[in-house]
Amino acid sequence: MKYKTPKRSTKNKQYYCIELNCNNPVFKEGNKCRSCGNKNKVYINRPSNRKGVTLSEVTKQKMRESNKTSNKGKICSLESRKKMSDAKLKGKDYITPLVVRLRNIFEYRQWRSDVFKRDDFICQKCGLRGIRLEVHHIKRFLDILREYNIKTVEEALLCVELWDLNNGITYCEECHKLEHLHKL
């Protein structure tokens, strides 16, 4: 027996009068509202179920307090924005943007391609071919950048150890994950 997908509900759309303080159901668009007599002023969506709900004083006070501490919509001075930016970056590694730039330059892609060719596009751990391969740095990329105090792309291009083929090895995704798990 074939499975049939259930059909969507074919209930008639419910229309509501938009006259102030009315919100009564109207049976078809264009019909008059039974309570106020308005015609062609209807909307399909139901009125909010929160309409008319009164909030306790405690809730109102909490809402007021949260709105006071919020910086949403406030315009900050340049000095304040710099302080906030510094606070966000505090404790983070400033080398990260350099690493991103280095991984997108031609020399890095060439180094990666040369490692794949040297290893004949085979995972050096499990020996599989034809799957997604990755190049693993034997000596970590960041460690080399820190060791030679590299701050710019030009300095990185001059560093011989960074582009050494013997510092890379081809792994498949799974073996690469395992390699990093064993180092932890």
Image (cartoon, grey):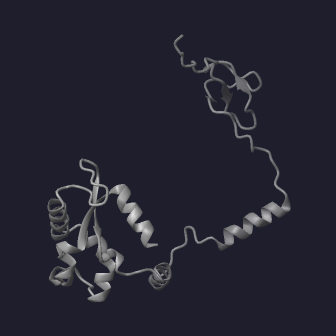
Front-most of residues 152 and 84: 152
Image location of residue 148, percent across then percent down: 26, 88
Front-most of residues 59 and 184: 184
How many marks do you count on the picture? 0
Residue sitting at 72 percent across and 25 percent down? 25
Front-most of residues 72 and 34: 72
Image quarter where the N terminus lies is: top right
Image location of residue 173, percent across then percent down: 35, 56
Left/right of residue 30 with respect to residue 106 in the rendered view:
right
Residue sitting at 64 percent across and 18 percent down? 11
Indicate the quadrant where residue 126 lies. bottom left
Front-most of residues 103 and 165: 165
Residue sitting at 84 percent across and 63 percent down? 58
Using the image, determine if residue 110 lies above or below residue 5.
below
Residue sitting at 85 percent across and 57 percent down? 56
Indicate the quadrant where residue 116 lies. bottom left
Left/right of residue 173 with respect to residue 158 in the rendered view:
right
Using the image, determine if residue 167 lies above or below residue 28.
below
Image location of residue 104, percent across then percent down: 23, 66
Indicate the quadrant where residue 133 lies. bottom left
Image location of residue 16, percent across then percent down: 68, 28
